[in-house]
Image (cartoon, helix red, strand yellow):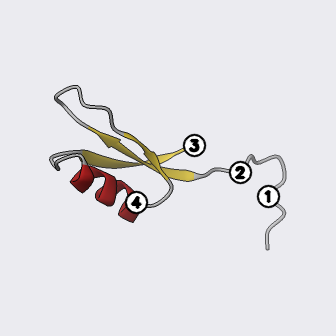
Amino acid sequence: MGCNCGGKRRSTVFVLSYGDGRQGGEFTSKTDAEIADVRKGGGGTIRQVQK
């Protein structure tokens, strides 16, 4: 393991968004985001974001 001196921990989240105003959300895995998209009717865009 490296020391990661001075670095802050980065986490990856998957953001589900829609172009038609529907509420998306943030998920810890791509699978969770895909499931939520299907439950909301599909058509969403999933992006991977470093926080």
**Residue bearing the label numbered 1:** 4
Hey, which residue is sitting farthest front in the picture?
39
Q: Are marks 3 and 1 in contact (CB under 8 Å)?
A: no
Q: Residues within 10 Å of mark 4 (few under 14, many from 20)?
A: few
C-alpha separation, residue under disc 4 versus residue under disc 2: 22 Å
Q: Nearer the viewer, residue 35 or 11?
A: 35
Instruction: Choose mark 2 or mark 1, whichever is in front.
Output: 2
Residue 47 lies left or right of residue 51; in this view the side is left
Quote the CA–CA distance across marks 2 and 3. 9 Å
Classify 10 Å Cα crowding around label 1: few (below 14), some (14-19), many (20 and above): few
Distance from the alpha carbon under mark 3 to that under mark 4: 18 Å
The first of marks 3 and 4 along the sequence is 4
Residue at image coords 82%, 46%: 6
User: Disc 2 to disc 1, how far (Cα)?
Assistant: 9 Å
Who's the residue at 40% across and 60% down the image? 32
Q: Nearer the viewer, mark 4 or mark 1?
A: 4
Numbered disc 3: secondary structure: loop
Please identify the quadrant where the N terminus is shown.
Answer: bottom right
Question: Would you say 51 lies left or right of 39 here?
Answer: right
Give the Cα distance between marks 3 and 1: 16 Å
What amino acid type should be assigned to the residue bearing mark 4? Asp
Residue designated by label 3: 51
**x, y (%) of residue 14?**
42, 50
The residue tagged 4 is 32
In this rendering, position of residue 25 left or right of residue 11 = left
State which mark lies toward you, 3 or 1. 3
The residue that disc 2 covers is: 9
